[in-house]
Amino acid sequence: MKFLDQAKIYIKAGSGGSGSAHFRREKFIEYGGPDGGDGGDGGSVIFESERNLNTLIDFRYTQHFKAEKGQDGSKRKRTGANGKDLIIKIPVGTQIYEEDNNTLIYDFTKNKEKYLVAAGGKHGFGNVRFKSSTNRAPTKKTKGNAGEEFWIWLQLKVIADVGIIGMPNAGKSSLLAALTRAKPKIANYPFTTLNPNLGVTVYGNKEITLADIPGLIEGAHEGTGLGDKFLRHIERCKILLHLLDLSEKDLTKNYLKVRKELEKYDKTLSKKIEIIVLNKSDLLEKKEIEKKMNLFKTKIKKKVEIISVFTDKKLLDIKKILLKNVHK
């Protein structure tokens, strides 16, 4: 499935129906009174969040959305039918912004949330409304009001319990596949993952959602390697799983690079709970692993876990650690 996390669309609510200027025309009644009915209200544009959606790709191909207009009133005081509301389905985690792409209208963080963004126009009045003791045969009627219409931006920020972060080619997609049933694209070269992948892992009667965030490189907070687009998907994650490639020469340098990008993008990201995992232990001898791990722990002074996503049984321990921290 193609992924799109930002889209600009035009929405238009329906206009209200106009009132009717009609008079009774009945046999034996020479001067029938006014009986023109009101128009119907225009339909509104409403957005609804859906948990089973995870991309805004549909909005690349359809950019204009219009709700139904209200029907005009008619004789015999008949009110026009209201226009149907237009319900637009979006993924949980979508934010709606005004055309400036800066002013937030609404943030969808839960499943089945609904929010009216563009209100339908109110109906016009029929001439029966204007009958009075001094005006027994009013011809006045009013038009329905126009519905709201404008451009808006949709921005999707993935909602996950755990964000898997790290340098390109650290094995994030492989770890996601090993911990969940997700099937991300996996290959042995940098930037295989160009969009966040989601997966769910279950242990006992509890489950957590994991997001594989595309690799971060130096300058990511400024947009290098599309980094700023990737970083925003970390904002909603409860905890971070920082994955490092044991086969790399300088673990500390790679670790600090990613931490620096998090802090420069948003200081709150660097304050999230972090689980450090050293991957690809199957590529090194035991002595070399211990040497690298001890050097890393001496400099970083944090607890680390060592795994291989292909051969290690410690994946179950990783699940337990994640569940413990997510459900604190």
Image: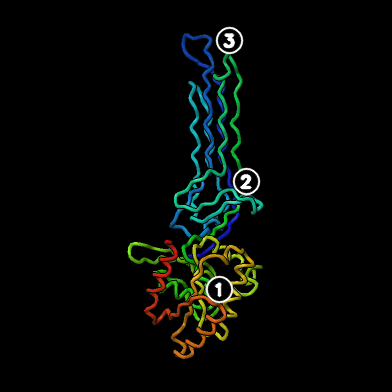
> Which residue type does callout 3 highlight?
Ser
Q: CA distance from mark 3 to mark 1?
A: 77 Å
Residue at numbered disc 3: 133
Residue at numbered disc 1: 215
The mark nearer the N terminus, 3 or 1, is: 3
> Which residue type does callout 1 highlight?
Gly
Tell me what residue is drawn at x 62 percent, y 46 percent: 150
Q: How many marks?
A: 3
The mark nearer the N terminus, 2 or 3, is: 3
Image vertical order of residue 284 relative to residue 65, above or below: below
Residue 195 horizontal/vertical position (percent): 53, 68
The mark nearer the N terminus, 1 or 2, is: 2
Q: From the viewer's perspective, is 282 left or right of 140?
A: left
Residue neighbourhood size for the residue with mark 1, other residues' Cα within 10 Å, grouped as few (<14), some (14–19), many (≥20) = many
Tell me what residue is drawn at x 47 percent, y 14 percent: 26
Mark 1 lies on a secondary structure that is loop
Residue at numbered disc 2: 150
Image vertical order of residue 1 relative to residue 151, above or below: below
Mark 3 lies on a secondary structure that is loop
